[in-house]
Image: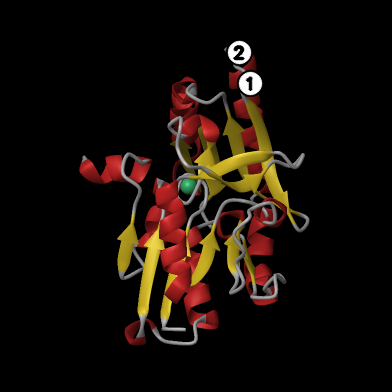
Amino acid sequence: MTPIVAFTDLDDTLFQTAAKCRPNQNLRTAALSSSGEPLSFMTLGQQLLVDLLLKDAYLIAVTARTGASLSRVKLKFNHGAIVNAGGTILDPNGQVDQKWHDITAPKAKQSQALLTEALEMANCFIDHFALEAKARLIGDYGLNFYLSIRTLPGHGSELSDLEKELSEFFGPKAAVNLSGHNLTVRPAYLDKARAVEFFIENYLAFSPEEGLIIGLGDSLADLGFLNLCHYQLIPTNSQLAKFRAL
Ligand SMILES: [Mg+2]
């Protein structure tokens, strides 16, 4: 293998739900739901891009998915992965990197009060406006990492006021990001970029100067780690592409 690594976000970068795909496309199932049904799909362009990367690069997932939901993705990440929005690093054997876990676990524990408060605020907002949205804490390996609030596809704007409210309330203590119909609240310590930095230092067989690092991502939550890469691949019409065009 050549010294090329591609750090890639998954959802809305390499695949998406059927509702976001144009009809009559040559779609391939990319991930299953928790009940085992096909849930996310790759367009032909996304399939070709992944094939191209897999040919010469080590592909590392950098995702907000938990370890369990990563296992429902049909692409295999045999060189390690970053899950829980940076909270956990899995080594090439799929085992939790203990050194990184020891860094993030105490911070995750300290963030419980913040997450509980954010969950209460979200549930109040959902009840008040009678939204068909669901707020839940995303946890893994005995820790809660962040809050996810999902509404129906195409109804993301219903969460705009909640995004503003949470963002003003928590200020620099948390990153609040509305992308599509998914609103997330991540305690400030939780950052994909820090996990990618750790991964580069501890897992790459080459130094960044001796190889090529490519980053792929679609949302503002990906921006930090994309900035650590030599090149950035951003889907057109994504949140990040629109942000960059401003
Ligand atoms: Mg994404």
Q: How far apart are labels 2 and 1 at the CA level?
A: 6 Å
Mark 1 Cβ inside 8 Å of ligand 1: no
Q: Quadrant of the C terminus?
A: top left
Residue 92 position in % (x across, y down): 64, 75
Task: Verify CB contact (< 8 Å) between mark 2 and mark 1.
Answer: yes
In the image, is residue 228 above or below residue 224?
below
Residue 38's tag is none
Residue in the foreground of this view, choosing between 108 and 204: 204
Q: Within 10 angstroms of label 1, few (less than 14), some, or many (20 or more) residues? A: few
| Type of the residue with mark 1 | Cys
Q: Which residue is mark 2?
A: 128
Secondary structure under tag 2 reads: helix
How many marks do you count on the picture? 2
- The reply to whether residue 116 is visible in this rendering is no
| Type of the residue with mark 2 | His
Q: Residue furthest left?
A: 246
Residue at position x 34%, y 52% in the image: 234
Secondary structure under tag 1 reads: helix
In the image, is residue 188 above or below residue 228?
above
Residue at position x 43%, y 76% in the image: 56
- The reply to whether residue 182 is visible in this rendering is yes
Residue at position x 52%, y 60% in the image: 62
Compared across the picture, whether 155 is left or right of 214 comes to: right
Residue in the foreground of this view, choosing between 134 and 17: 17
Q: Which residue is mark 1?
A: 124
In the image, is residue 127 above or below residue 93?
above
Compared across the picture, whether 124 is left or right of 2 comes to: right
Residue 7 position in % (x across, y down): 46, 65
Residue in the foreground of this view, choosing between 38 and 232: 38
Residue 134 position in % (x across, y down): 65, 27
Residue 214 position in % (x across, y down): 37, 68
